Amino acid sequence: MAHAVQSPSAPQGHRPHAVAAPPADSLPGRFERARHRVELDRLGWPLAEHFDVSAESGAPSNGFLLELMDGRSIVGEVERFLLAETVLEFRADYAATSHVVPFSEIKSLRLRQPLVLKPHKSLAGLKLEGALGDRDFLVTFVGGTTLGGRARAVMEDRHGLFIYHLYDGGKVFAVFVPRSAVTAERIGARLGQVLVAKE
């Protein structure tokens, strides 16, 4: 059963160290509409290839949803996203400090604010069938549960998948899934493959 009021647990053998949250005025986002566009850039989150990424106009800023391998779900903010070190610093909404969480404990991380992905102007003259970049995907987690549907874009890294998940109504949410949480994955053709096929 998920508990929304617990901090991520420490991996066995050591305790996570608390990291003081940065002052509010040090975070990017003086203009709320583009706040999480800047946040994803600041965190080093790979943005969708071939697209300009911005926050959906008028959508509230709701932080991130962190789902852990032990079944807990926690809402809060990502202070630092250290892809090379395979850890992140996460501060739950109720907490004054953040904690280091290794990717090995994470099932998925989702930005709760919807995003807008617009094709780069350089692609305006190309005639592509269907929605630009949209493709099916299916991720199978350790334990047998799955995440699937349509993705506006998927960025692959040796440490995980960065999925721009397309939900009902055309809303797009940025999702990170660590490789350590995945037993199988199936991702449809990329935009680059479609372009090559049309040449």
Image (cartoon, helix red, strand yellow):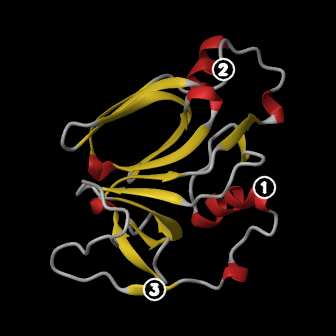
The mark that comes first in sequence, 1 or 2, is 1
Q: Look at the image and tell me in which quarter the C terminus lies.
A: top right
Tag 3 near tag 1, CB within 8 Å: no
Q: Are marks 2 and 3 in contact (CB under 8 Å)?
A: no
Write down the residue under mark 1.
33
Q: CA distance from mark 3 to mark 1?
A: 28 Å
Task: Residue type at mark 3: give it.
Answer: Val
Q: Residue at x 60, y 19 (%)?
A: 194
Q: Which residue is mark 2?
A: 131
Left or right of 41 in this view: 155 = left
Left or right, 3 with respect to 169, comes to left
Which residue position is annotated with label 3? 19
Q: Is residue 69 above or below residue 53?
A: below
The amino acid type of the residue labelled 2 equals: Ala
Q: Nearer the viewer, mark 1 or mark 2?
A: 1
Lower sequence index among marks 2 and 3: 3
Question: Which of the two labelled residues, at mark 3 and mark 1, occupies the earlier sequence position?
Answer: 3
Could you tell me which residue is drawn at 37 percent across and 68 percent down? Answer: 5
Nearest to the observer: residue 16 or residue 127: 16
Q: In terms of depth relative to the viewer, which is nearer, 9 or 39?
A: 9
Crowding around mark 2 (Cα neighbors within 10 Å: few <14, some 14 to 19, many 20+) is few
Q: Secondary structure at mark 2?
A: loop
Label 3 element class: strand
